[in-house]
Image: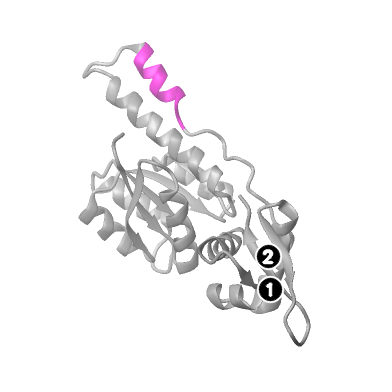
Amino acid sequence: MEQLDVVVVDDDFLVVKVHTRFVEMVPGFRVVATAATGQQALDAVDEHDPHLVLLDVHLPDMTGIEVLRRLRAAGHDVGVLMVTAAREVEQVRAARTGGAFGYLVKPFGQPDLAARLADFRAELERLAQVDEEAGQEDIDSIFAGGPASAPRPTTLPKGLSADTGELVLAAVRETPDLSAAECGEAVGLSRVTARRYLEHFVGTGELEGRQQYGRVGRPEKRYRHVR
């Protein structure tokens, strides 16, 4: 399986961390660079010549749509998947006419992104199979294989973020037996906020919580990953 190189672009370092992890959970994909601004994204594409860019719309120096237009004007045919919380119709239309492969709305889960990456690989494979002169059937096959509609995003209770939730799960995976305070310290959350995430995932069955009794004081709840 050919390894496909990806550049992740977002001005939130926590989001970059989560999306990088999402990508690298998919066999055959690897993140070769990350960027926090539009100019860094353009420079990363020039340097690494990736197959795909995960591109946020809202960046400090220019919009993701402007990055997309500059990539096309420079002759880069790199695949671009807009990954953003922006839902304005104008942004979606601009992404489509600018040649984006797809548009995935935050927050979303790893399976949502994995499905889009699979679609992208399938499109590359369809293009590779077409001879230098394509017949109408080949052309129809290529255009029919365009990006699917965005899957329904994974939802969490009000006030909880899917990106932060993934960081919490990652912390518990890395350290199999964590308290809310320890998890909060690892992720950068208060103990109370970390507990809200942990208890949510206990409710979904992804984590298991148990009371640990010490010699003195109140029992402490510890959490571990169960799947």
- Residue hosting label 1: 193
Range shown magenta = 137-146
Tell me if residue 159 can be seen.
no
Q: Does the stretch in magenta take in 109? A: no
Q: Main secondary structure of the magenta part?
A: helix
- Residue hosting label 2: 197
Q: Residue at x 44, y 40 (%)?
A: 117
- At which x and y percent is residue 24? 41, 50
Q: Is residue 213 above or below residue 156?
A: below
Q: Residue at x 53, y 48 (%)?
A: 110
- At which x and y percent is residue 157? 74, 59
On screen, residue 1 versus residue 104, left or right, reads left
Q: Marks 2 and 1: CB-CB under 8 Å? A: yes
Q: Is residue 173 above or below residue 118?
A: below
Q: Amino acid at mark 2?
A: Tyr
Q: Does the stretch in magenta take in 140? A: yes
Q: Residues within 10 Å of mark 1 (few under 14, many from 20)?
A: some
Along the line of sight, the residue nearer the viewer: 57 or 193:
193
